Structures are given as structure tokens and as C-alpha cells.
């Protein structure tokens, strides 16, 4: 596959924001959007994906600033839907939080955002006849930035919720998935429903959607006389990883995207089950824009063009996220209810 090198402009985070972001990204909105809260952890930006195992099937991800992205063709019908206020300068200003691969992370130069969300943002802008201006943004800052008009869109693993729909419009581009991961040589091969977790020792993030789901499954099991889940909580990724690899825990349950990246690069864990992020409801990840500004309809059309011509699928496959692909982008899909 021949790829065409495409450029996008980026702005650096203000001094001091990067450190604050690192701390807050692991906690903010972990219940519905933040992959940084993954109990199983994620590989650091720029980490080597090489391995010495002769039979390794580890996936290598390009984390250099030179991304050589897939070529994108403009869609005149989608471009015609872009509001004049946005298209007048020829740019689409997109906020992205570079917190965790493969979604968004700083490249090996420590300043260029790369990842799935960045690729989708750049491709979406180009299919709308615009140039993407990628703005690294702390997670806590994007809502105010969109409302004030500082950012014309956000592609940062934002889950659609009923509460957010009061202030923002959405065009979906990924399913929100949570993953159960086991040690690569574990006998556990399938986790699909409550009975599959009975009696298991499971690492999960406190106060998260995944914990809420697991608590409900555990209650269901205990009501049926099945063994309870042993909940395990850890303050850092190293302790969590050690517990799983040493056999003190059977499973880790958290946001799938970052866990899938880790499993693909170090081959120490394997996916044994996927659950909708809003179980029993479907949860959608979406491009987010200011409510009523008209851009969401253009984003939906542009995303559907990328889905139809195959570019979208190539991007998700490139970052190991094919399991989270959508068949079509939806405009303001049903949001998760306020918990």
C-alpha cells in the first residue's frame, strides 16, 4: 500500500500544562471516556515495540513524527456542509489529548501528536477540503475550548452522553469498548457475561464504568449462588501488570484501546472479552463540536465518505482498533444516561 505524506500543523501545550495533564488525565471522566484510566496500563510514548523472541508476532506502531498517512480524496458534498465560519480560513482546529497510545500520544520527538485520533482528524479535515490544525489539549480543557470557539472540533475519545448532548453535537466514529485481558498463557479464553467472571480475581479501576459493570455482574452471580468476584485495585500500572503476570490476578478489565495496544506490543496479555462501554447500552465515541454550529452534519458526511472509500478502516487497522469500527457515522447518537 502506497501512502502519501501529509502534514498537519500543531500547537504545543503551554509550559506547565503537560505535567498537570499527566496527573489529571488518569482521573478525569474515567467513567466514560478516558483510556488513561485503563487498569491494565499502557506503553509509554515512543516505547520500542521490538522483541527478541524468534516467534514474535508483536505489532510495530509508527510513533515517529513522519507518519506517511493514507491519501485522502475530498468529498464535495460533505465539504459543502461545512459552515462558512469554519471554512473561511481553510483550517479545521481540532483538539486532541495526547495521553495514551494508540489513540493520541506525543511522537518520538516529544512534541508532535500522533495516533488514531490524530489520523482521523487529519483525514476528516482533508475530505472536507480543509487543513487540520491539531491542538494538544489537556482533557479537562476541551469542553470550555469548544464552547468558546477556540476549538472547532474535538477528537479525543469523547463518549456521547445525554448530559454532553445539552452543550455539544456529535458525529460518531468508534464504538466505546471495554476489554477483559488475561495473561497470554492463561487458560481463560472467553469472558462474555456475568457467569464468566464468577470467582475470578479481577483488576479494575475504582469509580469507573468498568467497575460499575463488574459490580452488577457480581451481584447477579451472587444472587444465583455463584462465587463472588475478587476485586483488585492498584494505584499504578506497574503494580497492576505485576499482579497479572505473577498470577495474583486472573483478569484486568478496562478501556480496550490502550489495553489492545499494550497486548500487541509486549505480547504478555491477550484479549478474552469485549463489552460495550455503557453495558447493557451501546456507547459511541464521537467527533465533538459546539451545539448548533452546524459542523457535526459535515463531520458525519465526511466520516461516512472515509468509511465508504476504505480509508477509515485502514486507519483503525493501522492502530489496532478494527474491533471498535463503526459501519457508519451517526449524527447525535443516543447518549449514555447520567449515572
Image: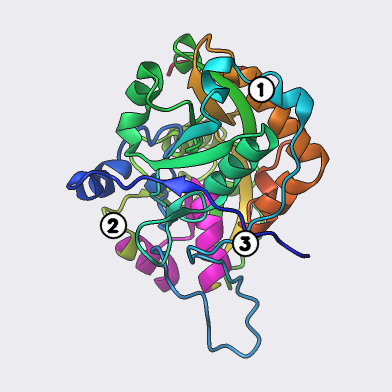
Q: Is residue 71 left or right of residue 332?
A: right
Distance in Å between CA atoms under marks 1 and 3: 25 Å
Q: Earlier in the sequence, mark 1 or mark 3?
A: 3
Distance in Å between CA atoms under marks 2 and 3: 34 Å
Could you say where residue 155 lies in the image, as x and y percent from the top left? Answer: 51, 36
Which mark is drawn over residue 236? Answer: 2
In reply to whether residue 261 is colored magenta, the answer given is yes
Could you say where residue 35 lies in the image, as x and y percent from the top left? Answer: 44, 45
Above or below for 18 versus 3: above
Which mark is drawn over residue 68? Answer: 3
Q: Residue at x 61, y 17 (%)?
A: 332
Which mark is drawn over residue 174? Answer: none
Q: Earlier in the sequence, mark 2 or mark 3?
A: 3
Q: For label 3, count other residues whose C-alpha is less than 10 Å away and answer few (under 14), some (14-19) or many (20+).
A: some
* Residue range (magenta): 239-266
Secondary structure at numbered mark 1: helix
- Residue identifier under label 1: 298
Is residue 122 visible to us here? yes
Residue situated in front as seen by the camera: 122 or 117: 122
| Quarter of the image where the C terminus is located | top left
Secondary structure at numbered mark 2: loop
Q: Residue at x 63, y 50 (%)?
A: 273
Amino acid at each position: 500500500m502506497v501512502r502519501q505524506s501529509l502534514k498537519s500543523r500543531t500547537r504545543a501545550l503551554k509550559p506547565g500544562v503537560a505535567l498537570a495533564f499527566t496527573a489529571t488525565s488518569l482521573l478525569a471522566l474515567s467513567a466514560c471516556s478516558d483510556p488513561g484510566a485503563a487498569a491494565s496500563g499502557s506503553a509509554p510514548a515512543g516505547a520500542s515495540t521490538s522483541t527478541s523472541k524468534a516467534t514474535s508476532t508483536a505489532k510495530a506502531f509508527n510513533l515517529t513524527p513522519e507518519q506517511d498517512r493514507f491519501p485522502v480524496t475530498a468529498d464535495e458534498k460533505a465539504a459543502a456542509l461545512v459552515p462558512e465560519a469554519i471554512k473561511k480560513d481553510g483550517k479545521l482546529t481540532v483538539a486532541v489529548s495526547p495521553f495514551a497510545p494508540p489513540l493520541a500520544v506525543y511522537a518520538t520527538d516529544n512534541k508532535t501528536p500522533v495516533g488514531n485520533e490524530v489520523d482521523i482528524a487529519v483525514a476528516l479535515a482533508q475530505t472536507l477540503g480543509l487543513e487540520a490544525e491539531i491542538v494538544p489539549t489537556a482533557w479537562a480543557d476541551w469542553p470550555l475550548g469548544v464552547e468558546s470557539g477556540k476549538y472547532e472540533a474535538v477528537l479525543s475519545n469523547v463518549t456521547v452522553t445525554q448530559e454532553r448532548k445539552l452543550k455539544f453535537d456529535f458525529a460518531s466514529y468508534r464504538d466505546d469498548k471495554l476489554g477483559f485481558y488475561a495473561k497470554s498463557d492463561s487458560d481463560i479464553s472467553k469472558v462474555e457475561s456475568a457467569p464468566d467472571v464468577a470467582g475470578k480475581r479481577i483488576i479494575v479501576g475504582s469509580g469507573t464504568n468498568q467497575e460499575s459493570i463488574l459490580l452488577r455482574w457480581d451481584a447477579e452471580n451472587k444472587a444465583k449462588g455463584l462465587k463472588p468476584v475478587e476485586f483488585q485495585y492498584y494505584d499504578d500500572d506497574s503494580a497492576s501488570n505485576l499482579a497479572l503476570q505473577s498470577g495474583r490476578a486472573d483478569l484486568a478489565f478496562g478501556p480496550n484501546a490502550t489495553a489492545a495496544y499494550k497486548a500487541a506490543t509486549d505480547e504478555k496479555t491477550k484479549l478474552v472479552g469485549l463489552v460495550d462501554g455503557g453495558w447493557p447500552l451501546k456507547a459511541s465515541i464521537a467527533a465533538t463540536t459546539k451545539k448548533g454550529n452546524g459542523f457535526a452534519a459535515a463531520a458525519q458526511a465526511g466520516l461516512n465518505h472515509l468509511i465508504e472509500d476504505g480509508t477509515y478502516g485502514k486507519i483503525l487497522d493501522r492502530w489496532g482498533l478494527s474491533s471498535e469500527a463503526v459501519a457508519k457515522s451517526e449524527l447525535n447518537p443516543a447518549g449514555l444516561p447520567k449515572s
